[in-house]
Structure formats: C-alpha cells, structure tokens
Image: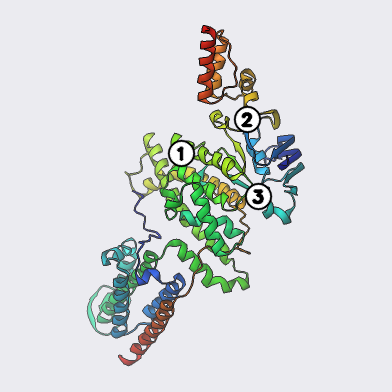
Amino acid sequence: MLKDVTLGQFFPGDTVVHRLDPRTKLILVIVYIVALFAAKTYAAYALVMIVLIVCVSLSQIRFTTIMKGVKPILIVILITGILNLFFTQGEHVIFRLWKLTMTWEGVRTAALMILRLIMLINGTFLLTYTTSPIALTDGLELLLSPLKKLRFPVHELAMMMSIALRFIPTLIEETDKIMSAQKARGADFDTGGIVQRAKAMLPLLVPLFVSAFRRADELSVAMESRCYHGGEGRTRMKKLTFARRDFGALILGAVFLAAVFALNRVWK
Amino acid sequence: MDSIIKTESLTYAYRSVEDEHPRVVLQGLDLEIERGTFVAILGHNGSGKSTLAKHFNGILLPLGGKVYVEGIDTSVEETMLEVRKRVGMVFQNPDNQLVANVVEEDVAFAPENLGYPPEEIRMRVDDALRIVGMYDMREHAPHLLSGGQKQRVAIAGVLAMSPKCVVFDEPTAMLDPQGRQDVIRTIRQLRDEMNVTVVLITHHMEETIHADRVVVMSDGKIVVDGPPKKVFPNVEYMREQGLDVPETVDILYELDKCGFHYRLDALSVDECAREILTAFTGAGA
C-alpha cells in the first residue's frame, strides 16, 4: 500500500535531458515556470506547451507517466477551475443561477488556469524523473552557494534533504512493519470514516517517531565517526561540470523566455 | 610493542534528568590496545563496553582520566579529526550508518569530509569496496541490499579513511547467519591482510575465537584480560559474569565433568574434534 509513493521518483536513462547538469535543469525549470505564468495569449501558451512536449519526448519518459503526477492534486486543480469559472468578471454571460454567473471570460480563464497548473506539475515532475535525488541536492547546494555569504545554511539544507531522501524507503518499510504488527494484534486501519481512520493512525505514528529519533541519534554518531564536521573543507567525489550542451540548453531557455514575452505582445 | 589506543583511569557516567546521581558506567579503566592485534571485548548488557568503545574515537569524552590514540589526547578539540581518521567505527544497525542513496556515494562520505581531491576519493572508494567485496554493487541503492551487504558497505565507508584501527560495536547483532559469516570474514581479513587493529565488541563467543586477546568487562571494570585459550577454559567464571563460552569449549567442559579429562582450550571445531579423538585413542592405547 505504501510502496507506490512517487515522491522524488527517478527514472534512470541516458538521454540529453538526463545528462544535463542538475544546475542547468534547475535553472531551466525556473525559466519554464516563469514563462508559464507570464504567458497570457494563446500563442504564448502554445509555445510553452510545444516546449514541454519536446522536452518530454527528448527524455523518453512516457506521457502517461508524466501525467500521473497530476493525480494527487486533481482536487486542487478542479477547485481552482470551478472558482475561476464562476468568479471571473465578464460581459458575455452564459447563464445566471441565483448569485452564480458563468461568463465566456470565466470559461476561458478556468481552462487556461487548469492547463497552466497541469503543465506546471508536468514540468517539475520532468525534473525529478530525469535527475537523481543526489544530483538534485548537489545542484541545489551549488546553485545556492552564493547565499552562504549571507550565512544561509546551504550545505546543511542540502545534507538534510539528501538524508531525508535516503531514509524515505527505510521509514516506509518500518511503517509497513509496525502496521503489520498492529494488525496482527487487532488494529483496524481500513474501515470507518476519516476521523476514525486518522485515530487508528495515531498508535502507528508514536512508535514511528520514537524509532525515527533513535535512528537520527545513531546516524549522527555514525556521521561524526566518519569525520563529518559540516560543509567546511568538504570536497566531493563527483564534481559537477558544465558541458557544452548545458550552455546550449541555457541559451535555448533564454530564447524561449524571450519568445514567450514577445508572443504576449505581438498576438493580442 | 607500541599501543594504538591507551586509556588511563578512564571514568564516565551518564547523567539522567530524573536521577540526581549520575549513573557511573566506567570506573577507572586502564586498557592498552597494541597495534595490529585483534581484541574482543565481552560483557553482559550494561557492562559499559559500548560506552568504552565510544571513547576510542572521541564520540564520548572522558569525565575523568585520559584516552590517547597514537599519543593524541581525544579530548583536544583541535585534533579530533586526526583521532577519528585513525580509529574508525562500525555500529550495530547498518541502516542507521548509511548516509547516501548510492553505495559508492556513501563510501565516499568520509574521504569527502576529510577534503581529499576527487581522484583520490575515487581511488579510496574503489579500493575499499573491493576489500569488502561490494565493488560490483557500487551503484545500488543501500535499502535494496541485505543486512550483511549493508554492513559491509558500512565497513567500506570506514576503510575509505584508511584507519589504523577499526572498532566494531556488535556488528553482527542484527544480521542473519550468512551475513554474520561474511562480516566476520571481512573483519578477519582486515587484521590478517591489511594489518588493521581490530576491536570487536560482541555477544557471540564464536566470533572471538580468532582474537589475540579477550577482555571481559563487568560493571565498568575489566575483570578478565587474556588470550582466548586462557580465558574460555574458565567456564564457571564466565557463566558467573553472565557470559557464555564457545560451543566447542562447552562440549569439552561437559565431557570433562562426566569424567573424561580434556584440555579446555580447543576453540575451533577442528581443534575440539582432535582433542576428543586423541583423548579416545590415548585411552584406548
């Protein structure tokens, strides 16, 4: 039941998208998000969508896999859509029902907003699907390293992220074990309403937390034993290096962003 | 012979919140561990053996007395890394020692912390993984490995620092028999082939028969100290300490009680069989 957690899932591969430096990919995802939210005209939307489709095809990840990421937040998307549908001011009224008015403008904004959210999730999932968690945290650490001057704990943050990722499968396994142990003694996790089920989870969380704290304690001793003393003077075995394709990708990213802004102006 | 670890009247106590009086765990312990030896530390639960081990690389600092690693005082903050580089430590639960998502990244953790250049880290990681026989699995995720394999990765992670001494704190307690065998074989290999000093804390008497020296602890003190062939024949005393003896010694001891006369220092299965055989043929002659 808990095995299908897709958080930080990574599909190894050897495509251009996989081989790009994680820093490049992080920057490009930010560029993509900015472009997505800047897009106002149909033409700009179309361009963003084409770029997304090209990137996904290049990564050789199936579109159905990419769309799976949308499922958990389907409700959020629907609510956003409905709100936009009824609360957008406009002149071309379709119908009026009590205080709710639906306008053509509302239909348009709702459709675009839903499209925008789905594409937002697709884009960010493409990043985590094609980048290993380690590469991702390394990239993030290096990208944020200028903030070290402002005493922002960049290294610590990256270390916490990678340890969290490392322990997700371990803790899931442990949760399964505790659940089985409690089911064996008559606990019921599957029936009843939401409140009842949440209550049934409580005796599960307590041992899980206790063990997580114990693990954290042991891990910190093991890390210290292996000479861990913070990020200072630490080197890495695998150095991230920018290749020519990274510069190329970044230039394409800049061109893409400029094109979106241009399309916003040209096609009104 | 020179010693690699030396404790001088080491005392330590845990302070608890509810209790006014700190619980004394180590009471004036003097111990010297010689370079290149295999020392096994035994003792029932709460005898202070794990606490002692944590003093060997400065994870815990003595409340009284001193601990020296190759002459370096472990309580000096500035030289802490020098101490930890020399004395590596492997713990009971392999899951809680592995830091990274990929085997080789995890082994690289210690040399990365020590700030070695990337090429050297690569070399150290590959060497360490070959020694423990996990080189072929260097790109696996640790949570997909078996307990014994994880523990060997943890050992590789320590070896990548090229320590002079490795302290094992019940490394086989959570492993299945196969994993236990692999880990013990690796531990012996460290001592025999790489001349690394080994300190092994364990509950399994069979793991200590290859040790050069057995140290038995009780209530924060050393009560017995000697080679296994001298320590284990003292079956009654060991049982009083809440400890067992290797099965081989146990068989000879029981036979001895039945009126056969055997030497009790046959530790390996072969030695034990030979002892029984010669006693029989000797009696027949």
Q: State if disc 3 and disc 2 touch (CB < 8 Å).
A: no
Image quadrant assignment for residue A187: top left
Badge 2: chain ID: B
Residue bearing the label numbered 3:
B86
Of marks 2 and 3, the one in the foreground: 3
B147 lies left or right of A17: right
In whole angstroms, how far apart are the C-alphas of marks 1 and 3? Answer: 26 Å
Badge 3: chain ID: B
Specify which label sits upstream in the sequence, 1 or 3: 3
- In what element is the residue under mark 1? helix
Q: State if disc 3 and disc 1 touch (CB < 8 Å).
A: no
Query: Residue A200's x, y, as percent?
Result: 40, 43
Instruction: Give the residue at x 74% y 40%.
Output: B7
In the displayed orientation, state which residue is furthest to the bottom.
A266
Q: Which mark is residue B43?
A: 2
- In what element is the residue under mark 2? loop
- In what element is the residue under mark 3? helix
Residue bearing the label numbered 1:
B179
Query: Residue A11's x, y, as percent?
Result: 35, 61
Instruction: Give the residue at x 59% y 41%.
Output: B191
The amino acid pointed to by label 2 is: Gly
Q: State if disc 1 and disc 2 touch (CB < 8 Å).
A: no
Which class describes the residues within 10 Å of circle 1: few (<14), some (14-19), or many (20+)? Answer: some
Query: Residue B121's x, y, as percent?
Result: 55, 60
